[in-house]
């Protein structure tokens, strides 16, 4: 199609669009890759209409068990070559409840820096999705999808948004949202390979604030996140001399995690006299 004139593409677009849609769901990977290049040329020629004609069809195919795997990869193929136009089109559709974190996770891996531009919409959506799955058989799968999204962020601006938005969400009056935010924060601190050193002070301060939360889940996740920073960044210094005890809080009291006998300060950082193992 690269050698085809714009007028010719316009003339044959009515037949090219159905062909591209079908090919993007083809069982053969090389066919899907070729179809993505056709989509690229169609978009260059007919613009936004290519998105309207092809992407909703692919999203609908995700509900068909026979072709959903191929349709998902078809979306990934077009994302890989046109992420700056495809992602803005897909994000509103994927983040409208019920949030499709499965597709968000899959596409995030090829979104590149385009992902950062949409974190302000994506993060609240994945937190909402996780909150709704807490305590259900789907909780672990939802956590895996959240992990795939946040670990796909590559630039410093994106890491700042992740930390700031998740910490802000831990202030929510709704305990489920605080729990979801704390869980994702723990995943981020435990699994991210990014250098977020410039954000450590606000991150550590925010995690320590959570030690006074009334939710045991928030307490445990925030401590695990701080523990992960200890092990990965080496900025906190746990001394394994005391056994770990679960935290308890009551309204108007300070969490046991913040007891002066448990926590101490040094050079602006926090040290703790006891620690517990954290699964890798």
Image (spheres, rainbow, N blue to C red):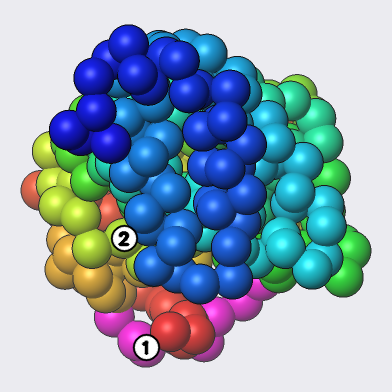
Q: What residue is disc 2 on?
A: 192
Q: Earlier in the sequence, mark 1 or mark 2?
A: 2
What span is in magenta?
239-246
Q: Nearer the viewer, residue 193 or 111?
A: 111
Residue 55 in the image: x percent, y percent?
59, 32
Q: What residue is disc 1 on?
A: 241
Identity of the residue drawn at 45% across and 69% down:
29
> What kind of element bears circle 2?
loop
Residue 227 found in image quarter:
bottom left
Identity of the residue drawn at 84% across and 45% down:
132
Give residue 46's mark: none
Question: Is residue 178 visible from the viewing direction of this image?
Answer: no
Residue 244 counted in the magenta span: yes
Horizontal relation, residue 232 to residue 183: left or right: left
Q: Nearer the viewer, residue 126 or 39?
A: 39
Identity of the residue drawn at 57% across and 43% down:
19
């Amino acid at each position: 199609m690269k050698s085809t004139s714009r007028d010719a593409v316009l003339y044959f677009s009515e037949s090219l669009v159905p062909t591209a849609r079908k090919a993007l769901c083809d069982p053969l990977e090389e066919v899907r890759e070729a179809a993505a290049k056709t989509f690229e040329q169609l978009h260059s020629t007919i613009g936004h209409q290519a998105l309207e004609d092809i992407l909703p069809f692919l999203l609908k195919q995700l509900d068909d068990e026979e072709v959903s795997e191929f349709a998902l990869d078809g979306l990934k193929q077009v994302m890989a070559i046109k992420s700056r136009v495809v992602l803005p089109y897909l994000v509103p559709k994927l983040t409208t409840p019920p949030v499709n974190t499965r597709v968000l996770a899959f596409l995030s891996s090829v979104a590149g820096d385009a992902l950062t531009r949409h974190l302000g919409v994506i993060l609240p959506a994945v937190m909402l999705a996780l909150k709704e799955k807490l305590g259900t058989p789907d909780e672990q799968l939802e956590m895996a999808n959240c992990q795939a999204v946040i670990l796909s962020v590559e630039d410093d601006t994106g890491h700042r948004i992740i930390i700031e938005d998740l910490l802000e969400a831990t202030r929510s009056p709704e305990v489920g949202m605080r729990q979801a935010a704390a869980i994702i924060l723990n995943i981020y601190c435990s699994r991210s390979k990014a250098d977020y050193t410039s954000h450590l002070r606000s991150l550590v301060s925010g995690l320590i604030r959570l030690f006074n939360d009334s939710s045991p889940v928030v307490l445990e996740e925030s401590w695990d996140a701080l523990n992960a920073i200890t092990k990965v960044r080496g900025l906190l210094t746990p001394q394994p001399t005391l056994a770990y005890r679960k935290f308890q809080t009551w309204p108007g009291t300070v969490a046991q995690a913040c007891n002066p006998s448990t926590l101490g300060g040094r050079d602006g950082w926090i040290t703790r006299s006891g620690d517990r193992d954290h699964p890798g």
